[in-house]
Amino acid sequence: MMEKTFLMLKPDAVQRGFVGEIISTFEKKGFKLAGMKFIQVDRALAEEHYAEHKGKGFFEPTVEYIMSSPVVAMVWQGKNVVALARELMGATNPANANPGSIRGRYGMDISRNVIHGSDSVTSAEREISLYFKPEELVEYTKAGDEWLSE
Ligand code: CDP
Ligand code: MG
């Protein structure tokens, strides 16, 4: 089974109109989309998503923030996709993110950092199961796969 990660285009990405461009970044790299939905996150899901940060000062504002607009929830698959997606995203604080990265290109402030991505394979499994039922993920052959690796 190919490695999978959970990515979310956060409210600022949706509201500022970067959905297509960011999806394009992952498509062009060669990763394969396995699941996608456009949803309004409710409080229970938002708190579960950020459960590891409960008790920190930014927990409540971050929960409020991802409930503030619809988001695009996605599962992408490919070789080393968890770590490589984090590289493509850039540092948590866009102010410190490589300017070529997604957060570096589109963001200004840590509280509006455009995209979420799982930080480990274990987190990815947990986050995917929060947002997707197993039958909502698809396995398929993609034209072009044979041009990505031998
Ligand atoms: O998203 P990432 O895994 O890179 O960072 P995190 O440390 O797991 O924090 C989760 C999210 O909380 C960040 O993406 C920010 O949106 C927010 N955050 C914040 O607003 N202020 C902080 N000092 C740290 C995190
Ligand atoms: Mg994190």
Image: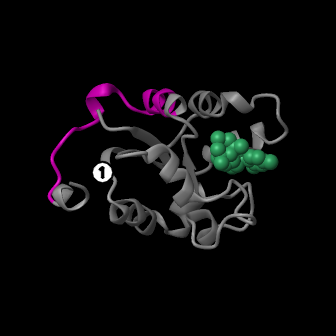
Q: Which residues are magenta?
A: 124-143
Residue 134: image quadrant is: top left
Residue 44 can be seen in this image: yes
Which quadrant contains ligand 2? Answer: top right
As displayed, is residue 125 above or below residue 26? above
Residue 111: image quadrant is: bottom right
Amino acid type shown at disc 1? Lys
Q: Residue at x 68, y 58 (%)?
A: 112
Residue at disc 1, CB closer than 8 Å to ligand 1: no
**Residue at label 1?**
32
Task: Look at the numbered disc 1 and give the secondary structure of its residue.
Answer: strand
Residue 9 can be seen in this image: no
- Measured as percent of width and height from the top left, residue 104 is found at 64, 68
In front: 70, or 19? 19
Q: Residue at x 62, y 49 (%)?
A: 68
- Measured as percent of width and height from the top left, residue 69 is found at 56, 52
Q: In which quadrant is the C terminus drawn?
A: bottom left
- Measured as percent of width and height from the top left, residue 27 is found at 34, 61
Q: Is residue 139 inside the magenta stretch?
A: yes
> How many marks on residues?
1
